[in-house]
Structures are given as structure tokens and as C-alpha cells.
Amino acid sequence: MFQLSVPAKLARRPAAFALLGLAALGLSACAGKERPRADLAASQVTTIGVNSYLWRASLDALSFMPLLQADSSGGVVITDWYANPGNANERMKVTVSILDQDLRADALRIAASRQVAQGGTWVDAPVQAATVQKLEEIILTRARDLRRSAIRN
């Protein structure tokens, strides 16, 4: 069997130390790099309890309606009754619930109520499903746009 003499073993140590030093130097160079910009705009970047893009998009989409409650921790936005100036005999109320920290379509739930004026009183009326779907689409599109701009900047 081949056996190294003591001087040969000592001669190999500087080479091993040199390789180890190069590896450590290479790894330390990686540590100083910044994180990719995409990480800064990840779907869960938030200091509130829910997805911040969905939250901001919901507030933007409902900005024309008076707000009763806006709870960023619970992810709930509740509007007061709003009557379109073009149709004063009808009013709407909307509740938006953000259910998750991810920017996903199923993280958004919208409920709308509608009333029409009949004989001086407000009477509940059905809300068209297309109305709620359109509002969901507006909020999700706006949230995606906000996320895209955060990635670009």
C-alpha cells in the first residue's frame, strides 16, 4: 500500500488551505449582492394583515363611495349606501373581504346590496351577478398593476 511521508503531507496542506480560502472568498462575494427586485414585490410583501395590493386596489375601486369601515388587519372594507346621481331611486352598498396575504383571485370576496325607492321607502332588490364580477375584475386588475409597478421600480 502507498503511504505518504510526513513531509509530503505537510506539502499538501498549503494547497488545501489555498483551495479553502478561494472557496470562502467566492462565497463571501455572493453575500454582498442585493436581492432581486422581484422579491421586493412578492405577493406577500405587507405590513398589514392582508395582501397590500388587494387592499390598495379595493380602496381605489371604492373611492367614489362613502366608507363605513376600513380594517386593514382584518381585510374588510364596508361602504355606506351610495346613490348614483344619475339614478337617485337606487342605491348600493358593498363589502369587500380580503381573505389571504397572497395576490390571488380566490383571496377576494365581494358582497353587494341594492335597494330601490318605492313609495318613499327603500326596498331590497337583487344585485346582478355581473355587477359583483365586474367589481372583482376591476380590483384584481388594479392589484396586478400595482404589483407590476412595484417590481419595475
Image: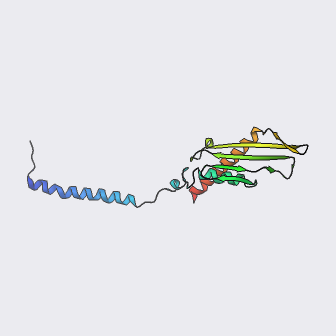
The colour scheme applied to this rendered structure is: rainbow
How many marks overall?
0
| Between 108 and 151, the one nearer to me in the picture | 108
User: Residue 97's image quarter?
Assistant: top right
Q: Residue at x 45, y 60 (%)?
A: 34
Q: What is the quadrant of residue 120 in the picture? A: top right
Q: Residue at x 62, y 54 (%)?
A: 146
Q: Quadrant of residue 99?
A: top right
Q: Which residue is at the far front?
A: 121
Q: Is residue 26 left or right of 72 when viewed as pictured?
A: left
Residue 73 is situated, as x and y percent measured from the top left of the image, at 59, 52
33 lies left or right of 60 = left
Q: Is residue 75 left or right of residue 62?
A: left
Quarter occupied by the C terminus: bottom right
**What residue is shown at x 30% (from left), y 56% (from top)?**
23
**Closer-to-camera residue (7/70):** 70
Q: Residue furthest right?
A: 119
Q: Which x, y percent locates residue 52?
A: 60, 53
152 or 88, nearer to the observer: 88
Query: Where residue 128 appears, x then y in whole percent?
Result: 78, 39
Query: Height in image: 117 above or below 17?
Result: above
Where is the N terminus found, in terms of image quarters? top left
